[in-house]
Image (tube, rainbow, N blue to C red):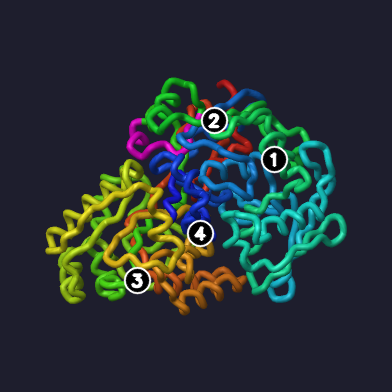
Amino acid sequence: MTPTGAGMHCRALPSFTRGGVFVSKFLVAILACAALAVSACGGSQGNNGPANTGNTAKARKGGKMTLGAASGIPQLNPAAAGTAFEITLNTLLWDGLTKLDQSGEAAPDLATSWQASNGNKTWTFKLAPNLKFSNGKALTARDAAKSFQYYLDPETTTQFKQQLASIKSAQAVGSDQVQLNLKTPNALVPKLIADVKVLDLSTLKSINKDPVVTGPFKVKSFIPDQRLTLVRNDNFHGTPAPLDELDIVRASDATAAVTSLRSGDLDALWSAPPSDVASLRSQFNIVEPKINGQYVSWEVDMTSPPFNDVRARQALAYAIDRNAIFKAAYYGQGDVSKTNTPLAENNPWFGGKLTNYSYNPGKAKQLFQAAGVKQLTWWGVSDQYPEWNTSAQILQESLKKIGVTMKIVNRDLSTWPNKFYPAGKKFPGLIVPNFQTYNSDPSLQLSFLLPGRCECNWNSKQFQATYDRSLSISDKAQRKAEWAKAQELINKDVPIYVPVQSAVVTATSKKMTGLWVDASGTPHLEQAGFAAAA
């Protein structure tokens, strides 16, 4: 189970992809994160433009900005990013062959163009001319190919393995082309490789002391989990960063972070606590995703009674008072998921003939009685994720009204791995809260439900086949139809419960401009800065 919140970036990965499955070695990183400081696992690269950007004026050149969070940055290797906040560095220090723009589409980065051949099984990317690392060393196709080999290496622990699963090999073609050879056809490669950053692997051992980077900033100083100071990288191939310097600091907790923002010690605060967002709006700009890529994912064991009976799973879906949970637990930040599916309704890929699972105690009672369910247990965590406890109390009261008793048990987060991970373990009668954070593309948001990934133990060959078929289709309309079928399977079989898609927002000073957030809530500061005085 991967409570990726303040921790995983997002997308669920090999058990930890900005979202996703639990990887025990990342437990320390998760424990260090504040409640509800979600995503990326990460997060993800730019996916969608902000619904509210506040000041949109062009940033003037110069100045020093301070970004804070209740989560720290423990290390600088982009492949090893294990917390949502670390993903913020992916576009500040590093570049890939492609990047995702504010609309969520693949855009040129180190590569200026690309083309597919062999039925979407071979992809060739052409690099821009005269590329350099921050130390002045020439950046070649060989560096890019070796970086892919590093990410694909079984010995490399990275949360991005899942989105690279279709890639068999990478090789340089001359000095300016990189060829990716796939195991199976995949029309989404330019999107899926945006998180693969090109590294000077000869300097990997010193990456936390003196990293050689490619992005708009480079490292001036770094104290792990406390402070990271960046300055403009004059060897950057793209539009120079407006800021002279960017300080990224960790607050002791979410309350202290909000206090620092209000006092002016911070220019921006990542993952503002939902309980504070309403009061912050009058004094600060609230920058939020246009489409939410983070979703709540309660899990049950589909292979054990009572949830091996689809009637019990559907009954629980109807018993969830989603609106009450949205207001009381998430303070109205995000979207209510009436169809119990991961994709938000304003996601362009949302669709299908989907049952509406809005709160219906009568329907829930009927199905629970038919399945013989009288008692359940909520298995949460102690002293973290207060939204989970609020959700549990609301659900407990709803179930009580229809004759089902639910016991609430909270345990230390450190006990979770052995109980739920890896997928395949049994936990009869338990409801286990979790959440996933991803780019809004269904290839990522729905990947958590592939066989062997979700601790819910859903093993649908039909879903797997539909998912694989969707990846291979180039035509968007045809691909949307396939993704609709995948959502219909999730909606009907109810492998997980998605009461809400929750929003991760960044609060900024009204003097700040140019900052935007993607679907996972990851802030983008490549062109952030201070607006010119009126």
Specify the amino acid type for callout 3: Met
Mark nearer the N terminus (3 vs 2): 2
Mark nearer the N terminus (3 vs 4): 4
Image marks 1 and 4: residues in contact by CB distance under 8 Å? no
| Quarter-of-image position of residue 263 | top left
Quadrant of the image containing the N terminus: bottom left
Q: Residue at x 26, y 71 (%)?
A: 306
Residue range (magenta): 268-279
Q: Residue at x 55, y 27 (%)?
A: 66
**Residue 200 location, x and y as percent?**
76, 46
277 is within the stretch colored magenta: yes
* In this picture, residue 481 sits left or right of residue 219: left
* In this picture, residue 116 sits left or right of residue 252: right
Q: Which residue is identified by label 1?
A: 207
Q: Which mark is residue 226?
A: 2
Q: Quick one: SS at disc 2?
A: loop
Q: Residue at x 23, y 56 (%)?
A: 321
